[in-house]
Amino acid sequence: MDDQADPADTGEARGAPPPGRWLSRTRERIRRRPDYRRLVLITALFGTAAGSYPVTVLSASLPHIARDLGTTDDIITWVIAAPMLAFAVITPIIGKIGDLYGHRRTYLVSFSLGTVLALATSLAWGITSLIVLRTLAQAAKAASGPSAMAMILSVFPQRDRTRALGIWAAVVALSPAVGVVTGGPLVEWLGWRILFVVQGLTVGLALLAALLVAPETPRRSGIRFDVPGAITLGIGVSGLLLAINRGISWGWTNPIVLVAATLAPMSLGLFVAVENRSNAPLLPPALLRRRAFTRPMTSQAVLQSGYMGAMVMAPFLLERRWGFRPTIIGLVMLPRPLSFALCARLGGHHDPKHGARRVAVTGMLVFAFAMVLAGVGAQQRWLPMFLSGAMLAGAGSGYIRPTVANSVTAAAGDADIGIAGGSMNMLQQIGAAVGITVLTALMADSLSGTRFLLLHLAAAGAGLVAAWLALGIQDTPTGSDPS
């Protein structure tokens, strides 16, 4: 018997193109549309939002999850902190892979894995499996940061990038807000696992959209990926965060903490030596010597420590000081991401007019004042004052986000957008993990309003330090060459 199909019976003979050819033709038609830039922006933003969807409502549900899984407040914070650690390690590596081999390909592979792992997280059978699966899922979706940003910037001219990044930052903030509105009731009715089912499905939809719309960025031929640099950076950053995070809880003489604290500076020092000798470094040393590249990232990382520390502390505060349940906690926390989104758009418009330095310093000072306000509200149990502080904290942090992103990527240049975005995300996550670790460890099981006031004052101090660092940010005129 002849196993070969009759051409008359195939789809191609009837005029239907094979799936691969249909996809190529559809992508080509989409690229020719006059609104293609907007479609790329929407697609990349949808993917980024899908990754951050459950953050706020998940934070609000931490006390409930801790009771459900029979664990402590200290351990349950790893559900937030561990994925941030993984993000900090993976994002610069993913960014560099995208720079070398194309950000579209990197994005698609990342989201394929992220879809599977997000759905798997809903099946977690204990606190350890929940932390591990969520960490792997967030690490898999690391391309939602640097590759999404690189694809957006690849289709927008320099003069329009800050405003596009303002929209990007606004959507990143609004996604957790949508999670509160939709996820809060779902958690009440169906339990916390439904969050990860919804996230897996939305990541899958983002993957399908990217197949049709996502643009390919230039690839670099003849350049090998810097494996030694990636390994030494990964070990160094992981060791640093592990030592800080567990040192407070386990004690600084704990063997694991001591090993991590020893490995971190050794690996980071080795990373610097490897990069200085490499012909194709993961993170070019010339970038690290460029203040226009390092100052915006450093100041935002310091601010992020206070912002995320206060945000993760908030559900515990609201439960202990006001007795709210998870859905109410999520709704009470809603003004923070909403104001973040609104002011991110505002910052994107103000940056070209007023300059990066003024925008950054203003936002950081607003954040510092907001933490004082929230701290007094927590101490006195004045909910309107606490909510006002939380809302202003989101406003200050959102206002600076597009300015920082544009300053960092402009300083790096288009050829290194991926590693620039990845480095920025890495420092943000390091700052966030440090802030979460320190503030939640100092919070412990306290019900004291005075302690919550002091912790918010510490977050305000981080905002003041960030504002001082931001004074060194250089203004880059629109359309200029940052180098």
Image (spheres, rainbow, N blue to C red):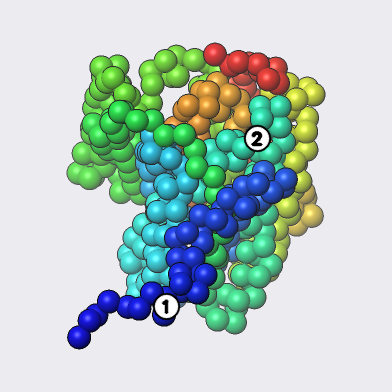
- Relative placement, left or right, of 368 versus 293 is right
Q: Give me the C-alpha separation between circle 1 and circle 2.
A: 46 Å
Whether tag 1 and tag 2 are in contact, CB under 8 A, the answer is: no
- Frontmost of labels 1 and 2 is 1
Residue 243 horizontal/vertical position (percent): 32, 40
Give me the disc on residue 156. 2
Element type where label 1 sits in the image: helix
Q: Secondary structure at mark 2?
A: loop
Q: What's under tag 2, amino acid-wise? A: Phe
Residue topped by disc 1: 8
Q: Position of residue 55 (x, y in %)?
A: 55, 58
Residue 185 appears left or right of 435: right
Residue at horizontal 22 percent and vertical 45 percent from the top: 256
- How many numbered marks have been drawn onto this rendered protein structure? 2
- Pointer 1: residues within 10 angstroms few (<14), some, or many (20+)? few
- Placement of 194 over or under 474, stated as above or below: below
Q: Residue at x 66, y 50 (%)?
A: 39
Quadrant of the rendering where the N terminus is positioned: bottom left
* Viewer can see residue 449: no
Q: Nearer the viewer, residue 12 or 169?
A: 12
Q: Is residue 165 left or right of residue 300?
A: right
Question: Would you identify the image quadrant in which residue 99 lies?
Answer: top left
